[in-house]
Image (cartoon, helix red, strand yellow):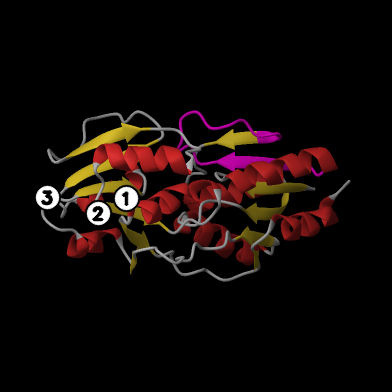
Amino acid sequence: MTVLILAGTGEARQIAQYCATQGIRAIASLAGVTRQPVKLAIQTRYGGFGGADGFRDYLKAHQITAIVDATHPFASNITRRSFEIAHEIGLPLLRFERPEWVPMVGDHWITLTDESEAADHVKAGAVVFLATGRQSLSKFANLSHARLICRQIDQPDGEFPWPNGQYLIGRPPFSVADEEALFRQLNVDVLVVKNAGGAASRTKLDAARLLGTSVLMIARPAPCGGLSVQSLPEIEQWLRQWQS
């Protein structure tokens, strides 16, 4: 009996550690978006499965008996495919759904449903800090009237796609003081961020509040359904049924 953990978040690392210490046979899967991910405490595979058929084949070949989806809240394609295939073949699946961020007193947030809507809220000449990752960068092509700074974990393979922008390389975690100093140095007018939730990455929002910086918050995709929880103790309780 083997649990497959779809990883890629800090919580997934904690779930993997729990399985390792509790004698739960588990395999973690990382999509390979980050080039040098933090090593997990259990056997880990890297890269995609090769589509839906490849995922089915993997589940069968490795005798997977349950799935924990602890991917990023915006990894909607992986989440949806995993849910549909698990339902199709009768595998139990539990989704860890990290609680969303909510605005606090002093925040200046505008919620967007898609990155391309940011252009409606950015003035000409504004400095825009994109904390949304390189995978959605193409959706900001309509921000030619602003200065763009896109933070990446890994060094990009090529130049910034447009003359009005640049990459900034940085690996988290970042403290509130770090983020505040960076935003001051860059004269950031607008922060664009996905509502990923989590305490570790909220520091940029705390810094924006202190500085009075506007935040364009990208709303999460609609949930695909199925069983989900919002805390690690609930995950651990669910996993104990596979404890050896």
Marks 2 and 3 sit apart, C-alpha to C-alpha, by: 19 Å
How dense is the environment of label 2, judged by Cα within 10 Å: few (below 14), some, or many (20 and up)? some
Q: Residue at x 48, y 56 (%)?
A: 196
The residue identified by callout 1 is 136
Q: Residue 29 location, x and y as percent?
A: 59, 41
Query: Residue 139 has which mark?
Result: 2
User: From mark 1 to mark 2, how far is it between C-alphas?
Assistant: 6 Å
Asked if one can make out residue 215 in the rendered structure from this viewpoint, the answer is: yes
Q: Earlier in the sequence, mark 3 or mark 1?
A: 3
Left or right? Give the position of 164 relative to 37: left
Indicate whether 155 appears above or below 229: above
Q: Which residues are magenta?
A: 23-43
Residue 232 disc label:
none
Q: Give the residue type that dot 1 points to.
A: Ser
Farthest residue, direction right: 244
Residue bearing mark 3: 125
- Callout 3 secondary element: loop
Dot 3 and dot 1 residues touching (CB under 8 Å): no
Q: Amino acid at mark 2?
A: Lys
What's the amino acid at mark 3?
Gly
Relative image position of residue 201 (x, y in whole percent) = 49, 47
| Residue drawn at point x = 60 percent, y = 35 percent | 45
Q: Secondary structure at mark 2?
A: helix
Of badges 3 and 1, the one in the foreground is 3
Q: Is 3 situated left or right of 213 in this image?
A: right
Question: Mark 1: which secondary structure?
Answer: helix
Within the magenta stretch, is there residue 52?
A: no
